[in-house]
């Protein structure tokens, strides 16, 4: 009879039977605190006993006799039933671990096992008789010297990657054997003793270096047991059981109770309670998260006001997640930023993110009315003045001022300036081509490295550009400036190499031609100066302790710096001629076209600019003007808000009349937060600051003033 045909009384009776059965089972389940016993006063830690440790769950009781003494418990080892969990490949490899020719099919588990257990071979004890190879009438063998390489300084260094197989009489590369996807001589067994120089060639090869790097990273991760709590297995004694069980195994070596608990309940299977399962692991993580979150919320509520910052990014599963960050000031006066959680994002519409933010604040017990700032990137859905996220949040709280991410805004200034004219665009395409040309070929890269090694200068290798990180562009331009001549010499060598493909030679000649242009030299020197300033400013803007006053000052100083570059074109021209070794502009060397004028049509006298003037007016000034315009526009978002508070930076120097006007304006803006006596309090606080010793660099620091208030506990006197 189906449940749909049961009466109400019958359904209630069935439900009661299920509940009674569940409660009966739960009464038999031991609670977590049952397993943690206090050492009885009448039991000595150093007492000896030959009694066997308990072997079943029922033997673990709360009586005094249940305490397991250190000397009663044997060291935790793999039981016979645990070794059955190893694959047949691992059982086989135990007896042939040091013979790579006998290694089975390589899989993830086998790699872990080999890296954990493989020991270095003792060269002096190896039997090289099986390595005999006949060359005409001469026999050759593996020699001890093959296991060493001679460095340039004369030092002999052991080839740790080399391993000898006595069964096959061949040499193997253990890194390539484990990680190389396609077979080569050193994965199948090298035995050409007449051409032992191939050992040197192999260890300098690209594939070997990649595989050695993988081996080292895998070895480090395995040594620390990785980062993930959970592993591929949930069985004690296995190597891939993850950090959670791995940590318990380590702790069990020093804790007799835990050791006994793992031996008796470590692998109970489904339906048995051990408090060691993945469910408990996840619960521990959740409890730690809750504890940390509660601490952060207590700090926020103690200091009342906060600001929010959110941004979305996709994870490895291509799921959009919203990072939720809160910024506030600690009781000590130090500003901090706390990441609270990832939130799965169903869409990028501002209305969706508005709902998510409000719900998140509500779940955390925070009031949106206490929010005094919001900071996002410059995307339209976030920064839109009418329907963007910042506008929607301000509808709930008008005092939640929107402050765009200053570092991101500065990045957009550079992106816009880089695409403002043809020469700027061509220059950055040229920089990227240099990196791509050398990095996509190991042969071309080795030619470049040889030229760098032969130079006494400290040089930077070519760097790739990035649209999102302008520090990468700064590094790329700096590398080009420092290695300008060496890059060019490497290109010339490649172009003269008869073994190179015609397409490679054509590409090389095109790059050489660009190196020989005066315009390229000027752009290299100019953009290096600009990007170095932008990069250093951007790193300062990304500091947690940065305040709005400092942001405005940094933007202003950068704007003044760019304006001063307008009169330095001649300096850049001189430096450009030096590095490019070219005296003339490309336009001056081109043949001038003679345009015939038709008598029946009026033609104005077109202004034809010479090479220098064309470069100066159509490129240099255009870039400068674009940088100035963008910096001015982007800084407005900060200067408007800073105008409310920047008088605190001049508190020790501002005249009373102006101070009164500024405090009145601030009180009107924050009428629910500030008292009308703010002016008198500021005057009083100013006199107080004059009476104490303050470093000269701190006399214009509002954050330092706040720390003084907090440290000296002056809130009852000054309500600032």
Image (cartoon, rainbow, N blue to C red):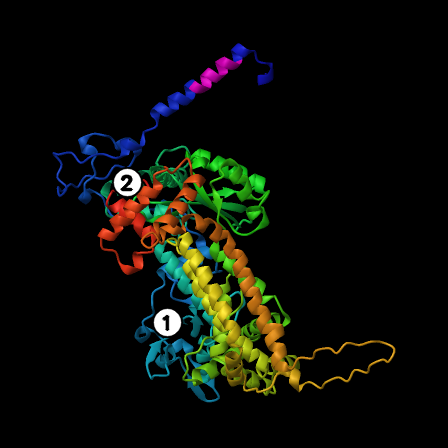
Residue under the point 34% across and 49% down: 656
**First to last magenta residue range:** 11-19
Residue 165 seen from this side: no
Residue under the point 54% across and 78% down: 522
Q: Is there a contact, CB below 8 Å, between mark 1 and mark 2?
A: no
Q: Is residue 712 magenta?
A: no
Residue under the point 42% across and 46% down: 233
Query: Which of the marked residues, 1 or 2, is nearer the chain's N terminus?
Result: 1
Q: Mark 1 highlights which residue? A: 160
Q: Position of residue 258 (x, y in %)?
A: 27, 41
Residue 15 seen from this side: yes
Q: Mark 2 highlights which residue? A: 715
> Extreme right residue here?
600
Q: Is residue 584 above or below residue 384?
A: below
Q: Quadrant of the C terminus?
A: top left
Label 2 secondary element? loop
Q: Position of residue 160 (x, y in %)?
A: 37, 71
Of badges 1 and 2, nearer the viewer stands: 2
Residue 502 falls in which quadrant of the image? bottom right
Cα gap from disc 1 to disc 2, whole angstroms = 65 Å
Query: Quick check: 319 left or right of 675?
Result: right
Along the line of sight, the residue nearer the viewer: 218 or 449 = 449
Query: Quick check: 194 left or right of 317?
Result: left
Characterize the magenta stretch by its predominant secondary structure.
helix
Residue under the point 43% across and 74% down: 171
Disc ID at residue 67: none
Q: Within 10 Å of the Cα at label 2, are there few (<14), some (14-19), or many (20+) other Cα atoms?
A: few
Q: Position of residue 653 (x, y in %)?
A: 33, 55
Q: Position of residue 284 (x, y in %)?
A: 36, 39
Along the line of sight, the residue nearer the viewer: 519 or 109 = 519
């Amino acid at each position: 009879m189906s449940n749909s045909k049961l009466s109400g009384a019958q359904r209630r009776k069935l439900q009661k039977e299920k509940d009674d059965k569940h409660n009966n089972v739960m009464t038999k389940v031991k609670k977590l605190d049952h397993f943690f016993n206090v050492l009885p006063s009448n039991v000595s830690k150093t007492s000896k006993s030959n009694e066997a440790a308990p072997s079943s769950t029922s033997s673990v009781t709360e009586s005094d006799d249940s305490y397991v003494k250190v000397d009663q418990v044997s060291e935790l080892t793999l039981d016979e039933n645990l070794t059955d969990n190893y694959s047949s490949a691992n059982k086989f490899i135990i007896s042939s671990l040091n013979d790579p020719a006998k290694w089975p099919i390589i899989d993830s588990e086998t790699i872990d096992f080999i890296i954990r257990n493989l020991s270095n071979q003792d060269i002096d004890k190896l039997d090289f008789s099986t390595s005999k190879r006949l060359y005409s009438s001469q026999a050759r063998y593996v020699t001890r010297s093959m296991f060493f390489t001679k460095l340039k300084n004369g030092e002999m260094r052991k080839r740790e990657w080399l391993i000898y197989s006595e069964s096959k009489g061949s040499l193997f590369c253990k890194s390539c054997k484990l990680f190389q996807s396609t077979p080569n001589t050193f994965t199948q067994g090298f035995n050409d003793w007449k051409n032992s120089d191939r050992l040197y060639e192999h260890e300098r090869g690209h594939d070997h270096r990649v595989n050695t790097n993988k081996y080292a990273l895998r070895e480090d991760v395995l040594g620390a047991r990785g980062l993930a709590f959970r592993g591929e297995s949930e069985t004690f004694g296995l190597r891939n059981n993850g950090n959670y069980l791995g940590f318990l195994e380590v702790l069990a070596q020093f804790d007799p109770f835990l050791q006994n608990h793992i031996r008796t309940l470590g692998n109970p299977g489904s339906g048995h309670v051990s408090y060691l399962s993945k469910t408990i692991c996840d619960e521990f993580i959740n409890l730690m998260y809750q504890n940390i979150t509660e601490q952060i919320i207590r700090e926020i509520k103690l200091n009342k006001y906060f600001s929010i910052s959110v941004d979305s990014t996709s994870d490895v599963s291509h799921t959009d997640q919203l990072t939720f960050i809160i910024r506030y000031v600690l009781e000590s006066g130090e500003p901090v930023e706390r990441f609270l959680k990832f939130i799965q994002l169903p869409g990028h519409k501002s209305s969706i993110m508005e709902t998510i933010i409000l719900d998140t604040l509500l779940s955390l017990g925070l009031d949106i009315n206490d929010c005094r700032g919001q900071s996002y990137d410059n995307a339209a859905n976030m920064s839109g003045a009418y329907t963007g996220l910042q506008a929607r949040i301000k509808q709930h709280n008008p005092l939640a001022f929107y402050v765009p991410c200053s570092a991101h805004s500065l990045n957009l200034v550079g992106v816009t300036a880089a695409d403002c004219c043809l020469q700027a665009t061509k220059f950055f395409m040229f920089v990227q081509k240099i990196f791509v040309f050398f990095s996509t070929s190991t042969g071309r890269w080795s030619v470049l490295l040889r030229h760098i090694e032969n130079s006494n200068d400290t040089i930077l290798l070519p760097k790739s550009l990035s649209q999102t990180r302008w520090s990468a562009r700064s590094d790329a331009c700096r590398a080009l400036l420092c290695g300008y001549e060496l890059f060019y010499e490497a290109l010339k060598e490649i172009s003269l190499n008869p073994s190179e493909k015609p397409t490679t030679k054509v590409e090389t000649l095109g790059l050489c031609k660009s190196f020989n242009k005066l315009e390229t030299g000027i752009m290299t020197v100019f953009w290096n100066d600009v990007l170095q300033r932008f990069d250093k400013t951007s790193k300062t803007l990304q500091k947690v302790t940065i305040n709005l006053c400092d942001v405005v000052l940094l933007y202003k100083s950068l704007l003044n710096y760019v304006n001063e570059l307008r009169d330095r074109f001649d300096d850049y021209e001189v430096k450009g001629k030096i590095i490019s070794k070219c005296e003339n502009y490309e336009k001056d060397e081109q043949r001038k076209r003679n345009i015939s004028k038709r008598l029946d049509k009026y033609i104005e006298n077109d202004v034809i600019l010479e090479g220098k003037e064309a470069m100066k007016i159509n490129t240099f000034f255009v870039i400068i003007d674009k940088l100035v315009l963008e910096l001015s526009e982007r800084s407005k978002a900060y200067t408007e808000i800073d105008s409310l508070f920047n008088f605190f930076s001049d508190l020790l120097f501002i005249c009373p009349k102006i101070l009164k006007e500024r405090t009145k304006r601030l009180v009107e803006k924050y009428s629910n937060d500030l008292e009308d006596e703010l002016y008198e309090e500021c005057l009083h606080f100013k006199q107080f600051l004059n009476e104490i010793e303050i470093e000269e660099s701190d006399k214009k620091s509002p954050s330092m003033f706040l720390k003084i208030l907090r440290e000296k506990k002056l809130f009852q006197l000054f309500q600032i």
